[in-house]
């Protein structure tokens, strides 16, 4: 008789989940990956703080538990648990309601003294440590003994420590494994050692004692060393972070978990980013009607104030203007290229100013738009011919995948997820982080655009036919879940 295999139970802890609460890419992942996993028959439940801005009526949120006891500080705190569903799915979302999350912002940025003996600690450290402990208490309250707790980024990085502490009292989580997922290695959550006593984690855990020797406790270090396995959001980035130049100071810690470190590429929402049904663009189109795409280019040129010319190459960029993204490689020399440029995004003033100055000096060739505009972003994906992603480092990157979905040929730096998604069949890459190499790569792309139209069309079609759906990514996560559950990691 064949034994029936039960569904894998996953508790997914995240500080963000679109559309309920989002600041960046973490929210996109938490709002999409669980849906795809549920379709693969994973019993996945999301746990999220109940922030003050989340609309209770809009999402039909109902209370399911009151007075949940969470050890914290000099005694105990209590929290309520509310439930809704991830929109467009049957994935339950449990919201932890507590005064810590009454703010209208996800991240407070405030500072708090936990102990008079020590200097101030970031308030968010306390808030998200509480969230993690409360989320696990909620799982016990609703009788959901997860096979795996997937803890995302530093906010939930103490999950393994809490589970080890709880398992000293009872066996509810005795078989639970932890998967620690790194989205942003740079934000680590560093606190004074008093945080351990404050959140009631066993101070005698070996990884806690070792970490505290240098005078602080790093949440991300705890997640990396304490979890059953660790993954990040692309295979190449998983290798790169083992090196000093990409490891954000944690390369030696990560090397200790090298055999349990995995890279799984993020996906994109292929329903939302779909040129055949996108209501945000001028003209819908598909691979078999690619000529219609030119109507989007013409409309975009007119909208942003560039000379409408369907034959002149239009080069787009949609990004955050920050150090990571490499926009400083774009200098005055680029104005000599036979093309137009449109740059969209917000970020640090120095990067914004540099691109604004270029647009001011060359108004007929360059447009710089400092704002967040979802519709305009879609129009740039659908209307420009070449898409730029010159990042210093890129854990995964989504814009290059979106661009390809729209028949937009990417020029990217070969790093992290950019290297994993862009090759000579779909676009152009450069290795050295210099303006000169970036410039030459765009030149190469323009030469094919103008002189080899058949090859250019092949690049477009190849990109449009690539599978960057979350279904593909979810299958990789399911493989890793199975390895964890079966003790193969």
Image (cartoon, rainbow, N blue to C red):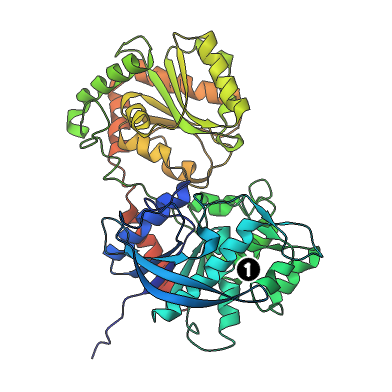
Q: Nearer the viewer, residue 354 or 126?
A: 126
- Does 160 sit above or below residue 61? below
Residue 298: where, in percent of width, then height?
Answer: 28, 16
- Does 485 sit above or below residue 301? below
Residue 150: where, in percent of width, then height?
Answer: 47, 66
Q: Please give the name of the residue rendered at 26% of the width and 39% of the height, measured from the top-left corner.
A: 274
Task: Give the residue furthest to the left.
Answer: 288
Residue 322: where, in percent of width, then height?
Answer: 58, 34
Q: Nearer the viewer, residue 419 or 186?
A: 186
Q: Viewed as shown, does residue 345 lie left or right of 275?
A: right
Residue count near mark 1 (Cα–Cα under 10 Å), binned few <14, some 14–19, many ≥20: many
Quadrant in which the N terminus appears: bottom left
Secondary structure at badge 1 equals helix
Count of number-bearing discs: 1
Task: Give the residue furthest to the bottom.
Answer: 1
- Does 410 sit above or below residue 59? above
Camera sees residue 440: yes
Q: Please give the name of the residue rendered at 61% of the width and 71% of the height, measured from the top-left corner.
A: 226
Disc 1 target residue: 225
Task: Give the residue furthest to the right.
Answer: 117
Q: Please give the name of the residue rendered at 31% of the width and 76% of the height, measured from the top-left corner.
A: 7
Residue 456: where, in percent of width, then height?
Answer: 32, 25
Q: Viewed as shown, does residue 338 lie left or right of 195?
A: left
Q: Nearer the viewer, residue 389 or 10?
A: 10
Q: Please give the name of the residue rendered at 75% of the width and 71% of the height, measured from the top-left corner.
A: 210
Camera sees residue 258: no
Q: Viewed as shown, does residue 210 lie left or right of 62?
A: right
């Amino acid at each position: 008789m064949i034994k029936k295999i039960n569904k894998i139970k996953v508790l997914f802890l995240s500080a963000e989940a679109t559309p309920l609460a989002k600041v960046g890419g973490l929210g996109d992942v938490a709002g999409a990956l669980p849906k795809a996993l549920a379709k693969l028959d994973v019993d996945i439940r999301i746990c999220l703080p109940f922030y003050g801005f989340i609309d209770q009526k809009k999402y039909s949120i109902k209370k399911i538990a009151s007075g949940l006891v969470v050890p914290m500080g000099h005694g105990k705190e209590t929290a309520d648990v509310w439930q809704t569903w991830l929109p467009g799915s049957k994935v339950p979302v449990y919201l932890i309601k507590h005064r810590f999350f009454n703010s209208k912002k996800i991240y407070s940025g405030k500072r708090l003294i936990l102990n008079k003996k020590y200097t101030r600690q970031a308030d968010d450290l306390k808030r998200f440590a509480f969230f993690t402990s409360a989320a696990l208490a909620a799982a016990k309250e609703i009788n959901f003994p997860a096979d795996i707790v997937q803890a995302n980024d530093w906010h939930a990085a103490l999950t393994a420590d809490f589970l080890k502490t709880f398992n000293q009292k009872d066996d509810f989580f005795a078989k639970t494994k932890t998967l620690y997922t790194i989205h942003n290695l740079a934000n680590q959550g560093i606190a004074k050692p008093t945080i351990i006593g404050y959140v009631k984690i066993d101070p005698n855990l070996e990884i806690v004692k070792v970490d505290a020797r240098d005078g602080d406790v790093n949440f991300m270090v705890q997640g990396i060393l304490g979890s059953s396995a660790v993954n990040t959001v692309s295979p190449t980035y998983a290798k790169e972070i083992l090196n000093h130049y990409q490891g954000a100071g944690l390369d030696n810690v990560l090397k200790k978990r090298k055999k349990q470190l995995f890279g799984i590429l993020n996906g994109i929402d292929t329903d939302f980013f779909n040129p055949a049904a996108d209501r945000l663009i001028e003209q819908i189109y598909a691979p078999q009607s690619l000529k219609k795409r030119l109507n989007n280019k013409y409309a975009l040129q007119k909208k942003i104030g560039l000379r409408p010319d369907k034959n002149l190459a239009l080069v787009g960029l949609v990004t955050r203007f920050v150090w990571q993204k490499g926009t400083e490689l774009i200098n005055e020399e680029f104005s000599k290229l036979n093309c137009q440029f449109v740059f969209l995004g917000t970020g640090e003033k120095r990067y914004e100013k540099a691109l604004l100055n270029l647009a001011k000096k060359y108004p007929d060739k360059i447009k710089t738009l400092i704002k967040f505009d979802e519709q305009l972003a879609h129009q740039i994906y659908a209307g420009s011919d070449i898409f730029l992603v010159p990042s210093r480092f890129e854990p995964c990157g989504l814009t290059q995948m979106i661009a390809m979905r729209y028949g937009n040929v990417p020029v990217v730096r070969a790093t992290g997820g950019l290297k994993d998604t862009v090759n000579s069949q779909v676009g152009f890459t450069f290795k050295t982080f210099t303006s000169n190499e970036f410039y030459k790569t765009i030149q190469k792309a323009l030469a094919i655009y103008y002189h080899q139209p058949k090859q250019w069309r092949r690049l477009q079609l190849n990109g449009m036919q690539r599978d960057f759906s979350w279904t593909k990514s979810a299958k990789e996560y399911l493989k890793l879940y199975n390895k964890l559950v079966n003790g193969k990691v």
